[in-house]
Amino acid sequence: MNIENIEAFIYVCQLGSFNKAAEALFLTQPSVTARIQSLEREMNLKLFHRNGKNISLSDKGEHFFPHAQKILQSYQDAKYGMQQVVLPNELNIGSALSISNNVLPTILPEIKSEFNNVRMKIVTGHSKDILNKVINKDVDFGIVRTETHPQVESILLYEDPIHLFVPPGHELLNQSKVTLENVGNQPLIFFDYGSMDWLYIHRLFSNNHITPNIALEVDNMETAKNLLLQGMGISFLPEHCVKKELEKGQLFRVALTPPIKMSINIDLIYLKGRSKSIFINFFKGKFKI
C-alpha cells in the first residue's frame, strides 16, 4: 500500500477539498486526484462521493479513515525513529580501564568502519562508574566486566578466563605441579575489592580452607598487572588484561593442579528502552546473545 496515497486521502478528509489538499502537499490537484483513485483501485472500493466540486466520505471511506491515520502515524513514527537511530553525530562509549587498554583497540576499528561519519568519544573508569554513567545517560553504552542493575540490559561480548600469572623466572614455573596451597604461600596481589573477580578468587581460597598471603590489594587490575611486572608478587587476572604481556614473554600463565576454571563476562550494557539503537543492533549482530 502506497503511503503517499494514504497521506493524500487523509489530507482530503481533513481539509474537505482536493484543491486544499494539493496546496498543503505542494502538489497539483490532478496529482491528488490520481493518488486517491489509485488507492480506491487498490482497495477496490469508493472512498468518496463526488457531486461536482463537492465531496463527502462514503461509508467505506469513513470506516477506513481512522485506520489510515494509524498507518500514517506508524510510518512517521518509524521514519523519525530511524532517523534518530541511524544519523547520530556522536557516540559516547564508557569503558572499564583495562578493557579500554586491552579490548577496545580491537573493537573500535570495526565500529569506526561501520559508522565512519560518527564522532566517537571514549570515557574510562571503574566498571561501576561506567554503569552509573549509562544510567545517567552520560554515555550511550558501556563495555564493562559484568555489572547488573534493573535499569540496564546487557549483551555478552565474550567470556574472559581468569588465570594465575607470574613474572619471568618465578619459582612456580619450575614446579611440575602447582597446587592452590602452593599459590597461597606466595605473595599475592589482589585487586578491585568487592568486584566479581575479587569474589571469585576469595571464594576459591575459602572453599579450599586456605588463607592466602595477600601482599598487596589495589583498586584496579591495571595496577595489579604493573606490580606483577615489577616482581611484587603473583596475581590472578583476566586473560584480556595480560594479552600483550603474554605475547612479549613479560608474564607467564601457571596451570593449577587440579585445574580450576574461573572466568568473568565482558558485557556491553545499555539503558533499557534503547534496544532499538543501531549501535546495539550492530553488537547483537556480531555476538550471540
Image (spheres, grey):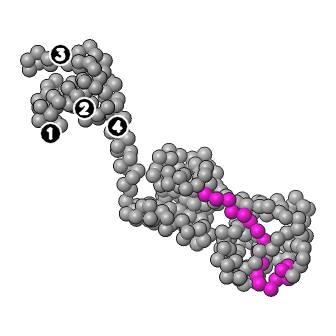
The magenta span reads 157-173
- What secondary structure is marked by label 3? strand
Q: Decide: is 239 above or below 34.
A: below
Residue 26: mark = 1
Q: Quadrant of residue 22?
A: top left
Residue at numbered disc 4? 75
Residue type (three-letter) at the residue carrying disc 1: Phe
Residue contact at pointers 3 and 4, CB within 8 angstroms: no
Asked whether, in this view, residue 164 is left or right of residue 149, the answer is right
Closer to the N terminus: mark 1 or mark 4?
Answer: 1
Choose mark 1 or mark 3, whichever is in front: 3
Residue 185 vertical placement versus 66 (above, below): below
What is the C-alpha distance between the residues marked 1 and 3?
A: 24 Å
For the question of whether residue 11 can be seen, the reply is no
Give the percent coordinates (x, y) of residue 125. Answer: 57, 66
Residue type highlighted by circle 4: Tyr
Picture quadrant where residue 287 is located: bottom right
Q: CA distance from mark 3 to mark 4?
A: 27 Å
Residue found 36% across the figure and 54% down from its top:
87
Provide residue 185's location: percent of width, then percent of height: 89, 75
Label 3 or label 4, whichever comes before in sequence order:
3
Query: Mark 1, residues whose alpha carbon is within 10 Å: few (<14), some, or many (≥20)?
Result: few
Magenta segment includes 161: yes
Give the residue type that dot 3 points to.
Answer: His
